[in-house]
Image (cartoon, helix red, strand yellow):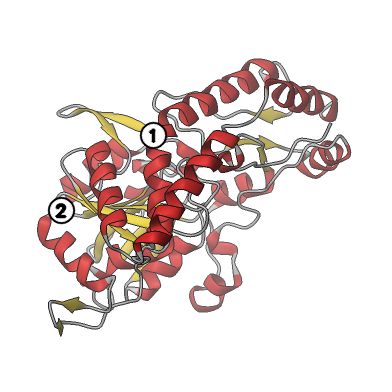
Amino acid sequence: MSVPFFRSPWKEPEAADRVSTAWTRVLDSGCYILGPAVQRFETALARRLGPRQVVGVNSGTDALVLALRLLDLKPGDEVVLPSYTFFACFEAVLRSGAQPVLCDSAPDDFIARAQEVAAKLTPRTRAVLAVPLFGDASALPGIAQLCHDNGLILVEDAAQALGAHAWAPDRGRVPVGGWGDLSTMSFYPTKTLGAIGDAGALSSARPELIERALSLRNHGLSGSLHAEVGYNSRMDALQAEVLLLGLEFLDGWLARRQAIARHYLAGLSDLQGMSLPADREGHAWNCFVLRCARRGDVRARLAEAGVETKIYYERPIHRQPACRTPFGEMDLPHASAHAREALALPIFPGMHEVEVERVIAAVRQAVV
């Protein structure tokens, strides 16, 4: 039996039938871009995130670009972000006109914590782009406090962590997407809340930022005037309807991801030669990524056994040509070491128990 790395939950019969009905409704309405469906989704997601407003856009990357544009960053302003994350974070900072400053990962973890961020702060730092990588939100409270203490803007890239949460001393349980001055989300199909195509959103508790984002996503249009040059970043109604349905399924999907992760942790905990991710409270488990010194051999044996795996991320940002050419060599040893060992196992809501057991058995055999 082969086990795919991902299988869309929208292929399940109940979900597929409901999508078909919703899309027929959109087609009959004649309103295919923005409109009532997008507004309903924005309202529903805002309710989940707390006292915030949401702006739907056409991708998680555009959400990042818009969020940083709203900060009115100037040349020479610095934004600190982790090197070990998806390249879109780096792109968005460059497109904002600011200087990206890459920080290392924690010595024993993929994520960058407050300590790693603090090491890169300078008098020119304006903002921090925090990433709850793979669904782990545990670093957000410390980074939020660091930003508060230093008068910095916190932009939270929640692309891989919608549905996760962490605890704040003064606020209690805070969902991912509710920590940043601006928070961004991706609904790429493999995310915890995935669309059937590209879509994204940003959220904020500051009405003036939301008002401007609504204009910028639609070419800077405000009423009949273009107040500034914006973007074509409008969410389409078909994806909004899918995401509205997905919000109904999300808690069940998250519970299934958590159950699979704990099954992996229990079944692989005694193996030598690999480090498993920590089972932290509030983890959304968008990805299950272990570290393995013999990654190449283990991955090849898993492929032979029919288990598909992925590498996140084979090269961190500071080792990508588009970064090294303008900025030169950087020494971020933990991110580089983690990148050499990272291996992601399949984890998705529709994964059957027999598939989970198959992965565990294959990993156990591969590391012998």
Residue 203, above or below 2: below
Q: Residues within 10 Å of mark 2 (few under 14, many from 20)?
A: few
Farthest residue, direction front: 28
The earlier-in-sequence mark between 2 and 1 is: 2
Mark 1 belongs to which amino acid?
Answer: Glu
Mark 2 belongs to which amino acid?
Answer: Gly
Q: Secondary structure at mark 1?
A: helix
Q: Is residue 162 visible?
A: no
Q: Position of residue 323 (x, y in %)?
A: 52, 71
Residue 354 numbered mark, or none? none
Q: Nearer the viewer, residue 356 or 95?
A: 356
Q: Position of residue 351 (x, y in %)?
A: 64, 30
Q: Position of residue 27 (x, y in %)?
A: 42, 61
Residue 248 numbered mark, or none? 1
Q: Secondary structure at mark 2?
A: loop
Q: Position of residue 18 (x, y in %)?
A: 48, 41
Residue 151 numbered mark, or none? 2
